[in-house]
């Protein structure tokens, strides 16, 4: 069995952002040489997500509005967590959008449904943060 590991780094200019990282993950898969197996991709930070959904900008705006309703960023003082930090909302947004995705690898490709793409969801950005890609198989 082959095994591959890589860390991708993202630094978003805004506090919250969604990035389609499918091309980066596909590059990892090419690099790994693995044709059949499983790929895990996870955020290595507790205020960021990796998730699969549609690459459609309207949907991403809808996520932003929905997440702000569930866990509004401001006022920062509304959260117990915000004693020394201001990112309680980001922890909550990450929780609902998820930590990781697992994708089947078939014939050297991500075995996706038609509209599935992998996204990095940043909720407390403007600093370098890491995403892990781990692939096992043959
Ligand atoms: Zn925090």
Image (cartoon, helix red, strand yellow):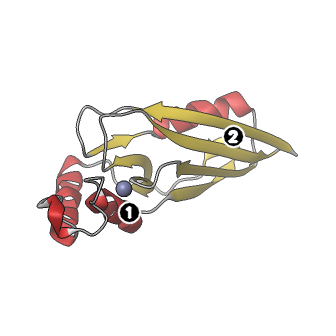
Rendered residue at 47%/49% (across/down): 45
The secondary element bearing badge 1 is classed as: helix
Q: Which residue is mark 1?
A: 97
Front residue of 95/73: it is 73
Of the numbered discs in the image, which one, if any, rests on residue 16? none
**121 sits to left or right of 118:** left
Quarter-of-image position of residue 27: top right
In whole angstroms, how far apart are the C-alphas of marks 1 and 2? 27 Å
Q: Which residue is mark 2?
A: 108
Q: How many marks?
A: 2
Dot placed on the residue nearer the N-terminal end, 1 or 2: 1
Rendered residue at 54%/51% (across/down): 42
Residue 34 is situated, as x and y percent measured from the top left of the image, at 75, 39
Please name which of the two marks, 1 or 2, marks the residue nearer to the observer: 1
Question: In the displayed structure, would residue 80 be above or below residue 137?
Answer: below
Give the quadrant of the C terminus: top right
Rendered residue at 38%/41% (across/down): 20
Residue 113 is situated, as x and y percent measured from the top left of the image, at 49, 57
Question: In the displayed structure, would residue 29 be above or below residue 137?
Answer: above
Q: Residue furthest left?
A: 75
In the image, ligand 1 is in what quadrant?
A: bottom left
Rendered residue at 34%/54% (across/down): 54
Front residue of 85/9: it is 85
């Amino acid at each position: 069995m082959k095994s591959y590991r890589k860390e991708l780094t993202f630094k978003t200019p805004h506090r919250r952002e969604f990035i389609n990282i499918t091309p980066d993950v596909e590059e990892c898969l090419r690099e790994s040489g693995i044709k059949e197996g499983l790929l895990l991709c996870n955020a290595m930070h507790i205020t960021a997500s990796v998730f699969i959904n549609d690459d459609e900008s309207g949907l991403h705006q809808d996520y932003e509005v929905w997440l702000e309703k569930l866990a509004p960023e401001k006022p920062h003082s509304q959260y117990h967590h915000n004693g020394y930090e201001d990112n309680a909302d980001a922890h909550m947004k990450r929780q609902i959008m998820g930590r990781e995705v697992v994708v089947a690898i078939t014939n050297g490709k991500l075995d996706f449904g038609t509209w599935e793409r992998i996204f990095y969801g940043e909720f407390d950005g403007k600093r370098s943060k890491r995403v892990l890609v781990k692939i096992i198989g043959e």
